[in-house]
Image (cartoon, rainbow, N blue to C red):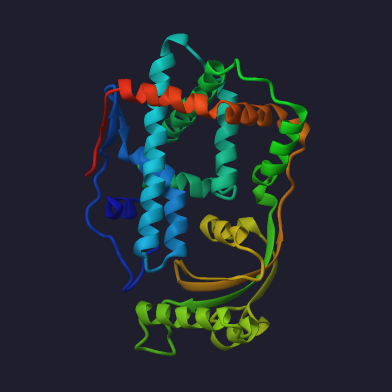
Amino acid sequence: MIRKLACLLSPFLIGALPVFSQAVEVNGIAAKVNGSVITKNEVAFMLSPIFAQLTTQYPRRGPEFERQFTEAREKILQELIDRRIILDEFKQIGANIRPNLIDEEVKRQIRELYNGNEALFREELKKSRMTMDGYREMTREKMVVQAMRAQQFSDAPPPLPNEIQNEYENVKSTLRDVTKDKISFRKIFIPSSDPENPVATPETQLALAEDITRQAKGGKSFEELAKTYSKDAFADLGGLQENLPRTDLSPEFAAILFDSPENQVVGPLLDPRGFTIAVVTVKSPGPSPALATVRPMIEERVRRKKTSAQYDRWIESRRKRAMITISRN
């Protein structure tokens, strides 16, 4: 299954590193819920940003890559199964979501998952053989489920002012406009092939990148290592790049850097041309929205937390009643 998804999702595996080139199933069934089909393409598309980040973060794949990938896939599949169960439960109500709200949610996901790059988003749609209409329908279903859940547990105690403020403080950074993020970091780039060394291979270049990473983590000057080994335009500056907009980075590379503590060596990371080692010096996050503009959403988050145990019992009872078949192929 991982190999099939790798074919579907990853355009930048290189050289002696794992390359997945066998024929890809056009589409298939990931699961059935009460006769309703969840396709492998739906799962693959939702996995694509996670897969890209994991592939970047773990050039050699390995057990940790497999563990995180499998965990992410199972979580997404369960989310889609629960979504079908809830839609079945409430389809008689005839809930509707206004088209403009769906448009806003799609734009939000493009902004947060693809750095606002709509072309990249559409490229991922194409790789997953999903149409924009299909993705809008997935989004509509997700929003319907959210509305249904809110209705089902509408008797939850109202959020208190301090609960709203605390929840806002906890999540406001995740609600920021990430397209306004900027970052400064030092970078060492090791190409997958070296014109100055004809016997170099992607495998030996990765081994070199791993050795440089060990030296940097061992306390050797990152700046000097960059000047010695890096093969890009910033080598003479010790690999320093300052105030770079997040939108100038690939979404997966940006996600890894912004999740990393400042002054911590990260890598080696796989990119389309080779391997990157980095250390973040300064992160400048984009602006977070004021509480007043996101208050309804924050209140809903508080309500969900208050009813989480009740919801877990409710959805588990529906799972037991539903006819669920999961494909393991």
Q: Residue at x 56, y 49 (%)?
A: 117
Name the image quarter holding residue 240: bottom right
Position of 158 compared to 62: left or right?
right
**Residue 195 is at least partly visible in this image:** yes
Report the number of numbered marks.
Answer: 0
**Residue 126 is at least partly visible in this image:** no
Across and down, in percent, residue 219 comes to 61, 83
Image quarter hosting the C terminus: top left
Report the front residue among 134 and 152: 152
Q: Residue at x 53, y 25 (%)?
A: 146
In the image, residue 267 sits, relative to residue 304, either above or below, namely: below
In the image, residue 102 sits, relative to residue 57, either above or below, namely: above
Q: Residue at x 62, y 26 (%)?
A: 303
Across and down, in percent, residue 144 comes to 50, 22
Across and down, in percent, residue 176 comes to 69, 45
Position of 307 compared to 323: left or right?
right
Name the image quarter holding residue 68: bottom left
Position of 237 compared to 266: left or right?
right
Across and down, in percent, residue 263 comes to 66, 71
In the image, residue 16 sits, relative to residue 153, either above or below, namely: below
In the image, residue 296 sits, relative to residue 54, either above or below, namely: above
Report the front residue among 71 and 226: 71
Q: Residue at x 44, y 90 (%)?
A: 196
